[in-house]
Amino acid sequence: MSYAVIQTGGKQYKVKSGEILKIEKLPESKPDAKIEFKEILAYGDNKIIEIGTPIVQGAKVEANLIKNSKNRTVLIFKKRRRQNSRRKNGHRQEFSMIRINKIFSKDGKILSEAEKISKSSKKEEIKKEVSK
């Protein structure tokens, strides 16, 4: 099984083809758009592994944007005892949900490719991922 380590939004993710991920929100992206990640730190499979210094030139990962949304509310509550001082604040972080389609090596060969899915199974996959 081929995998790649990509960097996006200041974080690193180990991805496989066909996998669905929640990542930091991608700017100016619309649903069902194709996204290419060029910052590949490493890729490989059971036999070989290619590690970049710091990135692998020419390697890329293609993905489809499923949706942009917001996470659940995180409440921030601060209280100073005996001061009658309280502060309540909330925050909802935005995210993008993507599906990894193809992983390309540095010479342009396809290492792994996700099988095509129909519209009805896309909705089922999204529901499963959101419920986790």
Image (cartoon, rainbow, N blue to C red):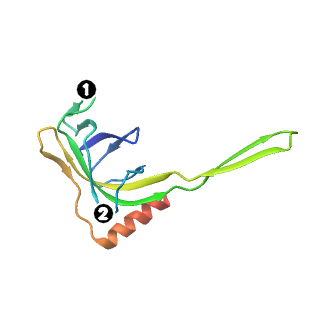
The mark lying in front, picked from 2 and 1, is: 2
What kind of element bears circle 1? Answer: loop
Mark pair 2, 1: CA separation: 32 Å
Q: Is residue 122 left or right of residue 80?
A: left
- N-terminal of the two: label 2 or label 1? 2
Residue drawn at (24%, 46%) of the image: 61
**Label 2 packing within 10 angstroms: few (<14), some (14-19), many (20+):** few
Residue drawn at (28%, 28%) of the image: 54
Query: Horizontal and vertical percent for residue 59?
Result: 19, 40
Query: In the drawing, what numbered circle is on residue 119?
Result: none
Looking at this rendering, what residue extends furthest in the top direction? Answer: 53
Q: Is residue 4 above or below residue 115?
A: above
Query: Horizontal and vertical percent for residue 94?
Result: 48, 53
Q: Quadrant of residue 49?
A: top left
What kind of element bears circle 2? Answer: loop
Query: Depth check: 51 or 69 in front?
Result: 69
Looking at this rendering, what residue extends furthest in the front direction? Answer: 28
Amino acid type at mark 1:
Thr
Query: Horizontal and vertical percent for residue 96?
Result: 40, 54
Residue drawn at (28%, 38%) of the image: 39
The residue labelled by disc 1 is 53
Query: Horizontal and vertical percent for residue 129?
Result: 43, 59
Q: Quadrant of residue 119?
A: bottom left
The residue labelled by disc 2 is 32
Query: Depth check: 40 or 79 in front?
Result: 79
Q: Is residue 124 above or below residue 109?
A: below
